Amino acid sequence: MKGQAFALFDTVIGRCGIAWSDSGLIGVQLPEATPGAAWARLRKRFPEAVETPVPAAIDRITGRVRDLLAGGRDDLTDIALDRGGVSDFNWRVYEIARAIAPGETSTYGEIARAMSEPGAARAVGRALGENPWPLVVPCHRVLAAAGRMGGFSAEGGATTKAQLLTIERARTSSAPTLFDLEFSVAPPRGGQIGR
């Protein structure tokens, strides 16, 4: 294939999109309010891309994204990205964000410190807001200070971010979640209630 291409694919959270070139992925699109809106956003973001049937290599990637959105633990770090047009600063942010495993979180400040730029938390947030590869570069795993959700540029904003973190069973605060609690409403085996 020469040039750029894109396709839409269905997931448990809605219709997503993927765009690619010979060098790797150029973009991932999270669901919009309607499938038509997702298509329109991809066309706007990648005007040179042609909608095309999905080749086998891209089909494997969409399958992995589907699995992740269904609760899988694939970190997607081996997927090649076409970084054309991405600034060096943003690329450094994305490399660090890609190292955050499913179910784990970091903060804008922690990423800035990892870059040896401790005062750059807001710049990290801006870079993540420009992330062309959500899910593959897991910007949803990056929170504001003190576990606050922070921003998210996809449709639905912070609600979508929280949904993605819930799918991954990520801990966003020190408060216990339902996954942490051990309880049962069933009577004890072999015994009577109140005995």
Image (cartoon, helix red, strand yellow):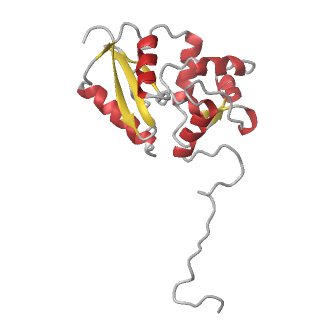
Residue at 39% from the left image edge and 27% from the top image edge: 79
Residue 72, given in percent of the width and then of the height, sits at: 43, 45
Residue at 66% from the left image edge and 89% from the top image edge: 194
Residue 71, given in percent of the width and then of the height, sits at: 46, 46
Single out the residue that lies furthest toward the bottom.
Answer: 195
Image quarter of the N terminus? top left
Q: Quadrant of residue 47?
A: top left
Query: Does 52 appear above or below 73?
Result: above
Residue at 70% from the left image edge and 45% from the top image edge: 173
Q: Quadrant of residue 61?
A: top left
- Residue 187 visible in the picture: yes
Residue 78, given in percent of the width and then of the height, sits at: 40, 29
Q: Quadrant of residue 67?
A: top left
How many numbered marks, from 0 up? 0
The reply, left or right, for residue 44 in relation to residue 182 is left
- Residue 168 visible in the picture: no
Residue at 33% from the left image edge and 36% from the top image edge: 63
Image quarter of the C terminus? bottom right
The reply, left or right, for residue 94 in relation to residue 75 is right
Residue 147, given in percent of the width and then of the height, sits at: 71, 38
Query: Does 123 appear above or below 76?
Result: above
